[in-house]
Image (spheres, helix red, strand yellow):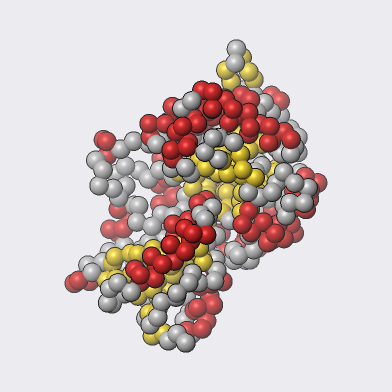
Amino acid sequence: MKKFSVFFVFIILAVCSTAVFSAHAATTKSASAKAVVTKSVVKVAAVVAPAATTKLEVSGWLPYWRAATSSADVLPHLNQLTEINPFGYTVKSDGTLYDAGNLNSATSSYATVIAAARTQHVRVIPTVMWSNTDAIHAVLSSPTLRAQHVAAIVAMVNQNNFDGVDIDYEGKKASDKDAYSAFLKQLYTAMGNKWVMCTIESRTPPADLNTTTPIDQFQYANDLPLINKYCDRVRIMTYDQESVDKTLNAAAGTSIYTPVADPAWISKVITLMEKDISPKKIEMGVATYGYEYDITPYANNSGYMYDLLWSFNPKYATQIANSLGITPQRNPAGEMAFTYTPTTTPATLPSGTSPATSTTANQTASVGNQLVATAQAATNSNALPGTIRYMTWSDATAIAQKVALAKKLGIRGIAIFKLDGGEDQGIWNILPTK
């Protein structure tokens, strides 16, 4: 039986639209939204101009590894969503699609929620996720393979009568920036009146970026102006901040600071990226999960060493807090948090968690990778004396702060990762209705 000695850290709370309008009840893009002239795509200015009363769009990813619970979770709340994104397709090394979510089948766990979404005029746009760096390079850098890949995506969308596609290609090489842009251009043209959504990495301002690479040598894999041109919505993954912002790290001083997403950091990211991407297209990524760390104090109270263990759904954290008699506190990033000191380390991955190496959009890790990550976490947590556990997560109040921030920044909406029944169910009390 585990025994715990409790170590409290009380932290002070620091509190910290528009779009291309659909003429088909928010499910199908108006034909006037795209015009093809000599095989090049030209946006129609009149369509881009937003209506001042357009409400904040809310989309949510429904992961295939929890397809049934995702569908059950979202089904009663479709009136609060503009779009659902079944996180169901991955890409094989040859550029063909793998239907991980069984979306091509009438017996899919997503079938009921998709049918209901269509009835309620909620866009149904599946995500195609790819994170194999070498395979991305091989396919997108080959004109032949790239064209075949585009054709496969278009066929998948048309055969299933989806409203479009969400492209989430991560881990790309900077040298493949032009190839990725060429892919988006081809896809955008081939999709016709269907939506093309792009999910991309956040970009911390260079002056704040915590990196050992000289800023003048830093290269990016995403060409933001071209992404703005060839994507109808741009979902920025404004989560998994951790220690990426050296300015905010320094401002935290000797306090524990490794948030999933601090509104102060999100504001910096959005402000920077909207220089190249229209705010009418930007959707702020909003996390519903948390992270657990081993934290070891440095000598002379000069800070902490953070060892990320795994991601978790909120219930995992609240169960531990309740069992220890701990009252979680809201930290400076607006998230719930607490510390404790375990006397034993789990031999297997705790229930309700996922390995830190395959969090958020990278949840497609194999079972073997999960076991490796578990073993590494167990080894690391035994490594140093004086180590404590720290848990920080996004609850409904933290999400409400992100909704308010999106409205304040004047961007198009928010994109929630993830809706699978494991999020704080209070989220449905703070999301706006259509």
Residue drawn at the location 34% of the way across and 56% of the way down: 243
Depth check: give the residue in front, 200 or 94: 94
Q: Position of residue 103 (x, y in %)?
A: 70, 46
Residue 142 placement, left or right of 244? right
Q: Is residue 261 above or below residue 347?
A: above
Residue drawn at the location 66% of the way across and 31% of the way down: 154
Residue 8 placement, left or right of 30? left
Question: Farthest top residue?
Answer: 38
Which of the 4 image quarters holds residue 283? top right
Q: Is residue 135 above or below residue 31?
A: below
Query: Do we see residue 308 in this rendering?
Result: yes
Depth check: give the residue in front, 406 or 208: 208
Q: Position of residue 383 (x, y in %)?
A: 30, 72
Question: Farthest right residue?
Answer: 119
Q: Position of residue 88 (x, y in %)?
A: 63, 48
Query: Do we see residue 85 in this rendering?
Result: no
Depth check: give the residue in front, 61 or 375: 375
Residue 310 placement, left or right of 61? left
Residue drawn at the location 52% of the way across and 42% of the way down: 130
Report the number of discs.
0
Residue drawn at the location 33% of the way across and 64% of the way down: 306
Question: Farthest left residue?
Answer: 300
Q: Is residue 26 above or below residue 394?
A: above
Q: Position of residue 227 (x, y in %)?
A: 50, 32
